[in-house]
């Protein structure tokens, strides 16, 4: 796969940055685009970009990811996450490029008690989840062997804003900490996810739906506790609260653990445990703390 070109949307976001780094480490040519160079609300700009770059693969990380913000601007969410993805899939097919579309655990309603399989029924609770599901349908509707939908969850990476950074900043400033206990999912480290995506492309596996997340599951409270322990701050009091007590505009799935066995079988291994990823994140984040979070589309 040496020399193969990738076009990465959402190149300034956590996963976009990790993908650019992973491509560089493997000697793969990659170009990143964002809102300025290729707005996802502009069909003509999308088509022109792909015709100019003619990548072998498009890694589509760009999205509106503000879950609560999507509730107040549903048209914006559907236009970017749904229609924009449809336009990107259309343009990728026109130039013969493969496509990896990053989706979310929010396509599920959280009523399950065992990990969600890739073919589990979907029922989004939020505008964000529904808009991402529209993007999934647009990609899968092409029926191409090189079009993939990859769902992931609770992504965090070095630099910028994310959950573990917020926990550490609050803990070190002496502010009280209360974290949700009744939402269970899978933390996912962006560099590990990036490697898994490139492995998927290299495998030439047939198109379809995949689930990718670090090994293991926890609540947001458990995630925060693991971050504090890894940072040597385990003695700091960590309070509890329910999701209902937060009174957020968008509902979240109470259970969104993903069954990643299909991807693990193709790669020959699962992603590392999320507890190990947290330790590696601490080292990497310390080196990039001033880099800024970037935008996700």
Image (cartoon, helix red, strand yellow):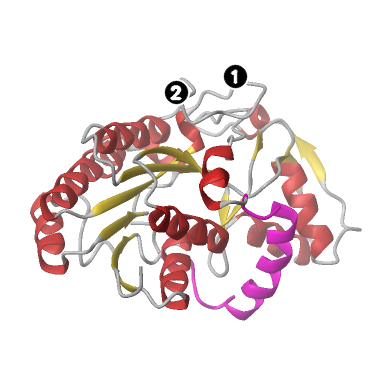
Pointer 1 or 2: first along the chain: 1
Q: Residue at x 54, y 52 (%)?
A: 267
Query: How many marks can you see?
Result: 2
Q: Is residue 11 left or right of residue 258?
A: left
Please, what secondary structure does the residue beneath circle 1 have?
loop
* Residue at the (74%, 51%) spot, across then down: 224
Q: Is residue 279 part of the magenta span, yes or no?
A: yes
Can see residue 175? no
| 293 is within the stretch colored magenta | yes
Q: Which residues are magenta?
A: 270-294
Q: Is residue 160 above or below residue 103?
A: below
Q: Residue at x 28, y 57 (%)?
A: 58
Give residue 49's position: percent from left, percent from top: 14, 63
Left or right for 275, reference 190:
right
**Viewer-proximal residue among 282 and 120:** 120
**Residue 64 position in % (x across, y down):** 36, 47
User: Residue 191 placed where, x, y %?
Assistant: 54, 64
Quadrant where the C terminus sits is: bottom left
Q: What residue does disc 1 label?
A: 111
**What residue did someone put label 2 on?**
122
Residue 208 image point, x, y percent:
37, 37
Depicted 174 relative to depicted 213: above or below:
below
Q: Secondary structure at mark 2?
A: loop
Task: Identify the residue at image location x=14%, y=50%.
Answer: 91
Q: Is residue 130 left or right of residue 192?
A: left
Q: Quadrant of the image for the N terminus?
A: bottom left
Are the two marked residues, 1 and 2, in contact with CB atoms closer than 8 angstroms? no
């Amino acid at each position: 796969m040496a020399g193969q070109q990738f076009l990465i949307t959402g190149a300034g976001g956590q996963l976009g940055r990790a993908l650019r780094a992973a491509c560089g480490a493997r000697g793969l040519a990659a170009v990143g685009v964002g809102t300025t160079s290729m707005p996802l609300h502009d069909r003509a700009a999308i088509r022109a970009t792909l015709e100019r770059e003619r990548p072998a693969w498009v890694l589509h990380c760009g999205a509106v990811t503000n879950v609560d913000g999507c509730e107040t601007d549903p048209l914006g969410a559907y236009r970017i996450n749904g229609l924009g993805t449809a336009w990107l899939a259309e343009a990728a097919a026109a130039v013969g490029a493969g496509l990896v579309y990053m989706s979310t655990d929010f396509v599920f309603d959280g009523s399950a008690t065992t990990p969600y399989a890739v073919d589990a029924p979907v029922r989004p609770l939020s505008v964000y989840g529904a808009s991402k599901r529209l993007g999934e349908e647009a990609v899968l509707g092409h029926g191409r062997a090189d079009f993939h939908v990859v769902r992931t969850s609770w992504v965090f990476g070095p630099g910028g804003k994310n959950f573990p950074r917020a926990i550490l900043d609050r803990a070190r400033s002496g502010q009280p900490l209360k974290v949700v206990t009744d939402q269970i999912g899978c933390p996912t480290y962006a560099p590990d996810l990036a490697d898994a995506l490139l492995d998927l492309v290299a495998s030439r596996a047939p198109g379809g739906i995949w689930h990718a997340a670090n090994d293991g599951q926890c609540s947001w409270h458990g995630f925060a506790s693991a971050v504090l322990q890894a940072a040597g701050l385990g003695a700091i009091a960590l309070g509890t609260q329910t999701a209902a007590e937060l009174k957020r505009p968008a509902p979240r799935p109470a259970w969104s653990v993903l069954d990643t066995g299909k991807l693990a079988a193709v790669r020959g291994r699962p992603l590392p445990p999320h507890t190990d990823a947290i330790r590696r994140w601490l080292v990497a984040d310390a080196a990039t703390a001033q880099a800024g979070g970037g935008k996700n589309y």
